[in-house]
Image: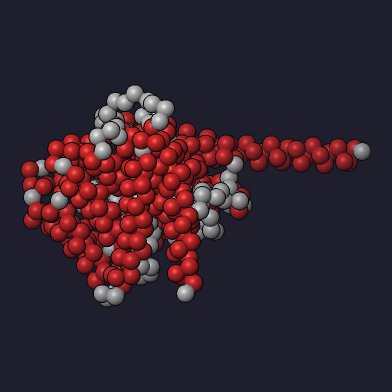
């Protein structure tokens, strides 16, 4: 009995130490990862401000020159990697790689991070997620080596870094916690880090991000600009036309995201692919400057300009944004789809509002956004939590209607794609 009791006490003490270490990692590294994310984000914004915030910033020749200069840097960084394709290292691939063995790949990861910073700074039609995740992934690998971490601890470290980084960027710890483990078919990873630990990491990451961002900048992080709206019980019904449009927009992006890299691959090697894709994007951006950047800070102006210009301009912005995003992602401009997807869906929602004035603008935007993001990303729970916290509770019924429709459309699209792949 004495020996059994002693062994039980040792086991209990071991479990307590294990839990304490997990809490320490989620808290301390979560804070640090959030702060690191804010520093890298500030660097991206600093490069962007330096290049674009002056009177020549919207002139067509200047736009072409800056984007092509960015493409030259991206091509150089890709050449230095000696591996991979222009389209790898994006946000979704990095989230998928979190579930593999934690490896210390300093050179490759830092080159991916540098190219993602260039992509954001030089005006790419992508979000900043890829560069932020690449830097935090490198930090996770270093910490894992320093701690001689077990597989479970490695998983916790990399999940903590990713959740903290995305929580800081999106301002939505619950959404970031789900996004890291929710698979493209909406299912949850079976070996996921406990949600409570990820949520703690997300809160600490958000705190670290806010404290660092506040010390570096006096500009608050802008939420989705939506007009004031009085909630009604039939928002979900009102949202259906915009949700259908958003689902179609998501399908169009999936096709572009799949086919543009195939087309570029037929033009030659990786460097040529980067330069050709960048040239196409440069011409698009010179023709319509609102296609540059992630769309996060440009959305309010784009909606005002588009609504005054009419349905045609709004549809052009929506289709142009997803095309520019697909071209950038295929051409080595690494980033995320979340913010550009919101921009495109909001433009489409505004077009639906103009065509059907009985559909409130806020309802149309939320319905289109929920459907578009769910079809393109395939992560309904993450979309729900991220958009609710990013956009506020302006019209949750419309958002939910879009997500439900988008979930079914995404499932149909995956079945169709798998059937084609099998032939």
Nearer to us in this view, 388 or 100: 388
Q: Is residue 350 above or below residue 245?
A: above
Nearer to us in this view, 394 or 245: 245
Q: Is residue 384 left or right of residue 51?
A: right
Q: Is residue 353 above or below residue 187?
A: above
Colour scheme in the image? secondary structure
Nearer to us in this view, 39 or 66: 66
Number of numbered discs overlaid on the protein picture: 0
Q: Report the residue that reaches farthest toward the right.
A: 1
Name the residue located 33 percent from the left edge and 34 percent from the top edge.
363
Name the residue located 79 percent from the left edge and 37 percent from the top edge.
9
On-image quarter of the N terminus = top right
Query: Does residue 24 appear anywhere in the picture?
Result: yes
Quarter of the image where one finds residue 259: bottom left
Q: Residue 28, image x and y in percent?
A: 50, 37
Q: Residue 343, image x and y in percent?
A: 28, 44
Name the residue located 48 percent from the left edge and 68 percent from the top edge.
419
Q: Is residue 32 left or right of residue 356?
A: right
Name the residue located 22 percent from the left edge and 48 percent from the top edge.
315
Q: Is residue 193 left or right of residue 57?
A: right
Q: Residue 144, image x and y in percent?
A: 53, 51
Q: Is residue 191 left or right of residue 301?
A: right
Q: Residue 39, image x and y in percent?
A: 33, 41
Nearer to us in this view, 319 or 277: 319
Query: Does residue 37 appear anywhere in the picture?
Result: no
Quarter of the image where one finds residue 109: bottom left
Q: Is residue 190 above or below residue 266?
A: above
């Amino acid at each position: 009995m004495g020996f059994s009791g002693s062994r039980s006490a040792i086991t209990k003490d071991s479990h307590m130490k294990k839990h304490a270490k997990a809490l320490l990692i989620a808290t301390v590294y979560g804070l640090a990862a959030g702060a690191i994310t804010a520093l890298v984000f500030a660097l991206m914004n600093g490069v962007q401000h330096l290049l674009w915030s002056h009177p020549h910033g919207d002139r067509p020749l200047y736009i072409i020159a800056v984007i092509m200069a960015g493409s030259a840097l991206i091509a150089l960084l890709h050449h230095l990697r000696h591996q991979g394709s222009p389209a790898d290292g994006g946000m979704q691939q990095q989230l998928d790689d979190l579930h593999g063995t934690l490896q210390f790949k300093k050179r490759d990861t830092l080159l991916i991070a540098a190219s993602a910073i260039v992509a954001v700074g030089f005006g790419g039609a992508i979000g900043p997620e890829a560069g932020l995740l690449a830097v935090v992934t490198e930090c996770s690998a270093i910490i894992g080596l320093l701690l001689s971490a077990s597989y479970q601890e490695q998983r916790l470290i990399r999940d903590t870094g990713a959740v903290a980084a995305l929580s800081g960027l999106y301002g939505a710890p619950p959404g970031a916690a789900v996004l890291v483990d929710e698979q493209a078919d909406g299912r949850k990873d079976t070996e996921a880090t406990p949600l409570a630990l990820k949520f703690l990491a997300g809160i600490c990451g958000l705190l670290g991000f806010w404290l660092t961002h506040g010390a570096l900048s006096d500009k608050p992080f802008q939420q989705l600009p939506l007009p004031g709206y009085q909630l009604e019980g039939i928002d979900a019904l009102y949202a259906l036309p915009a949700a259908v449009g958003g689902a179609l927009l998501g399908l169009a992006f999936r096709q572009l995201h799949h086919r543009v890299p195939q087309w570029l691959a037929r033009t030659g090697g990786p460097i040529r692919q980067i330069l050709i894709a960048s040239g196409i994007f440069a011409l698009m951006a010179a023709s319509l400057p609102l296609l540059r950047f992630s769309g996060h800070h440009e959305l309010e102006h784009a909606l005002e300009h588009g609504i005054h210009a009419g349905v045609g301009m709004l549809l052009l912005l929506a289709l142009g944004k997803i095309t520019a995003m697909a071209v950038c992602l295929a051409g080595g401009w690494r980033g995320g789809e979340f913010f550009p997807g919101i921009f495109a869906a909001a433009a489409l929602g505004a077009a639906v509002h103009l065509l059907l004035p009985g559909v409130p603008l806020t309802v149309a935007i939320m319905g289109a956004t929920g459907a578009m993001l769910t079809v393109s990303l395939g992560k309904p729970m993450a979309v729900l939590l991220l958009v609710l916290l990013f956009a506020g509770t302006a019209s949750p019924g419309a958002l939910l209607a879009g997500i439900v429709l988008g979930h079914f459309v995404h499932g149909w699209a995956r079945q169709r794609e798998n059937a084609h792949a099998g032939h």
